[in-house]
Structure formats: structure tokens, C-alpha cells
Amino acid sequence: MVGMNEANPFSNQGRLRNSKLIHASTLIAQAKEELTPEEVALHDSVREFVLDKPHPCVGAQSAFRKDEYWLGQYASLGTEESARALAEDLYEYTQEQIKHPKQFASFLAVFDGEVPEDEESFERKLWATLGHLDKLSREKDFSWDPQVSDDPENPKFSFSFAGTAFYVVGMHKKSSRLSRQFEKPMLIFNLHRQFDELRASGQYTRLRDTIRSRDKKLQGDNNPMLADFGDKSEARQYSGRQVGAEWKCPFHH
């Protein structure tokens, strides 16, 4: 594994800047590099999915319109191989956000390989990936973000990587929620501090209610898994699968 404080030259990560799609790793070297046609097609597909008018998450749409997002493509979801590549890029993303914080900025990880056969399969692979990321983070002596709990049963749980808390949104073709039905497995990492800043500025409630209203309009009903941070563990929300009170998170820090 390349050191987390170094750019990963083997990453497929890219984002759109100044209307030109380039490798994110080349931003550090201030160089420009064309992506392959396949990478461009993937980017366009993700961008179209997020910016589709009915899509509920107006925060994500804002990030895409302002080009304040990172997009990475990896091997199969749930494998150690893909998690190692993701760890490199996700770390670079956290460092970029520390230096140049944005109100809305997301990291999108898209995975190749087989599409999960159902929601439970996707959920297992999602948590396997987060487990691999946690192990890699601990190997580099990063602590859990002290602003959140590391216990997935705790109402203040949030996933942490490299000392930074994230709210994770899983998407895949077989999701029962229309807003999460993307052609490939995808994990979206949203910085937890962004929500804290929205609460502090008084913008959170309005944004939350707008997203939930749009999701209800798209789906036809409310998402029963949604809850505010501190009320119920957000671990129950990551995969998008509806789970009962007896559900136990397979992740343990």
C-alpha cells in the first residue's frame, strides 16, 4: 500500500474541473491528463444520475453543479483490493477538504464487478468495505473521530476513516429506494462536519426537510430508516435496506 500521505499514481480517481475531466492525483502535480473513454462514460453516467431533476439530494446536486466532488472507480465492492485503492484516494480527499473546505463536497466510489444479487448481499459488501477501511486506518495509527461514536449501536455513531467522520450512502441497482438505484455499486462519503456546520448556521432543518419531501415524491412514501443524528444510529441508513429493530450491524471497530 502506498503511504497515505502520498498520491496514488494508480488511482482511477477523477473529477471535473474547469469543464475538463482529469485524474485527481494529477491535481497535486498541477498536470492535466485525459481519462479513458470508459472513465468519461462512467463520470457522465454518475453526473446524469445525480443531476436528474427528481433526484432528492439537493446537496449532492449543488456539489455537482459546482464541481466540488471526487469520483473514483475501483474493483469489486467488499474486497480488500478495492478498499486499499479507495483508502488512498479517500485520504487525499480528506486532506483536500481540510485545506480547502467546501459547504457541499462528496466523495463517490463506484465499483466494478458483479452487481449484488439483492439488498442483503449489497449490505454485506458495504460493511466489508468499511471494515477493510477501518483496518487500514488503524494500521496507520489514526484514531476514531472524537466527535462521533465508534459503536454502531450508539445513536451518535458515524463511520470514521483517517480520523474523519463520514455519513455513508450506499447505492446499487437492486435497491428498493428509487433514489439509490444506480447501475453499479456505489458508496458516497459525506463529511460529517458538513452537517454540523449546517446545523450551526440554521440551514440543516430546511435542507433535511427538502430532501425528505423530494424523496417521498419520487418514491411515493417516506424512507422509514431515516433519522436525525443522535436519535438512532445512522448505521441503519447506510445500505438503504429497510431493517427491523432486531438488526445488528456487522461492523465492529
Image (spheres, grey):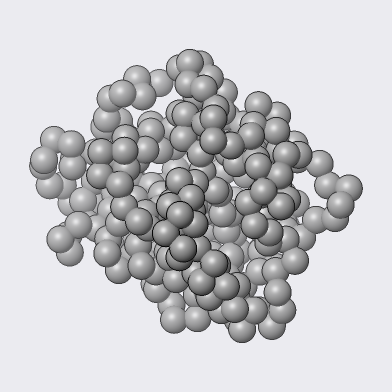
Q: Position of residue 128 (x, y in %)?
A: 64, 36
Instruction: Reply above or below: 214 against 142.
Output: below
Q: Quadrant of the C terminus?
A: top right
> Residue 2 falls in which quadrant of the image?
top left
- Quadrant position of residue 1: top left
Q: Residue at x 70, y 69 (%)?
A: 223
Which residue is rendered at x = 86% and y = 52% of the image? 245
User: Picture quarter containing residue 175?
Assistant: bottom right
Q: What is the tally of numbered marks visible in this picture?
A: 0
Q: Position of residue 115 (x, y in %)?
A: 61, 55
Image point (36%, 67%), residue name = 62
Residue 83 visible in image? no
Q: Eyeballing the image, is 20 above or below 151?
A: below
Identified at 73% across, 39% down, the residue is: 154
Q: Is residue 213 above or below residue 241?
A: below
Between 194 and 95, the one lying in front of the other is 194
Q: Observer-nearest residue: 131 or 148?
A: 148
Q: Residue 161: percent from the left, percent from the top? A: 50, 32
Residue found at the far right of this picture: 246
**Would you say 161 lies left or right of 238 here?**
left
Residue 118, image x, y percentages: 72, 57
